[in-house]
Amino acid sequence: MKRMIVAASGAAMLALGATASAAPAVNDGYDWTMRVNEDRVSDAILAYEVDGTDDQPLNFRCEQGGNRIFAGISGGAPDLTAIELASVSAKLRVTGKTEIDEMPFFQSQEIAGGSPLIRAFAANGWLRMTAKGRAIDMAATATGKQAIARFVDFCTR
């Protein structure tokens, strides 16, 4: 009887662990989109956004082949100094600076293009961002997953 309880507990823990790393649902209207800067073709942005709007909770920028990626948030908290990013079991706390012009804009310190977080994000097509205690899950559609893969390749090759 004791073995059955231990086995059942272990199976329950495995199920909970699998649920914790399962991809979240895609948010209606949102997806990851990649754009290459028209003025500087060596610069790209990957944004989680609603197409045709300013609704963009997170973006990443890089220079082609630079292996350095920077996270950005427009319109966030004016005192934001760090965000946490997670995808599956890869987690990263990134510090940065918020500047205020017309609206607050947070830009992170550099994230290595080959970091475990970026590799997990590219492989799984989703991440969770936590800023000032508020978490947002950002899952990609099939098209968004292709954009993520193209962006990581652009940044790291």
Image: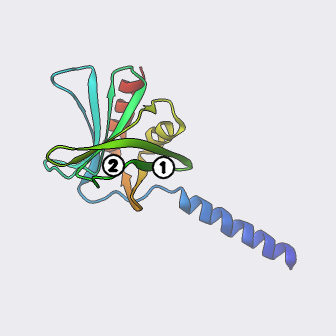
Whole-percent x and y of residue 12?
67, 69
Looking at the image, the residue that sits furthest to the right is 2
Q: Amino acid at mark 1?
A: Ala
Image quadrant in which the C terminus is located: top left
Q: Which residue is mark 2?
A: 141
Q: Nearer the viewer, mark 1 or mark 2?
A: 1
Q: CA distance from mark 1 to mark 2?
A: 18 Å
Image quadrant in which the N terminus is located: bottom right
Q: Amino acid at mark 2?
A: Thr
Q: Is residue 107 left or right of residue 51?
A: right
Vertical relation: 18 (above or below) 5: above
Vertical relation: 86 (above or below) 40: below
Local crowd size for mark 2, using a 10 Å CA cut-off: few (<14), some (14–19), many (≥20): some
Instruction: Label 2: state its secondary structure.
Output: loop
Q: Which residue is mark 1?
A: 86
Whole-percent x and y of residue 23?
46, 55
Q: Which residue occupies 37% across, 52% down?
A: 139
Q: Which residue occupies 43% across, 24% down?
A: 67
Vertical relation: 3 (above or below) 88: below
Quarter of the image for residue 5 reads: bottom right
Local crowd size for mark 1, using a 10 Å CA cut-off: few (<14), some (14–19), many (≥20): many
Disc 1 + disc 2, Cβ < 8 Å: no
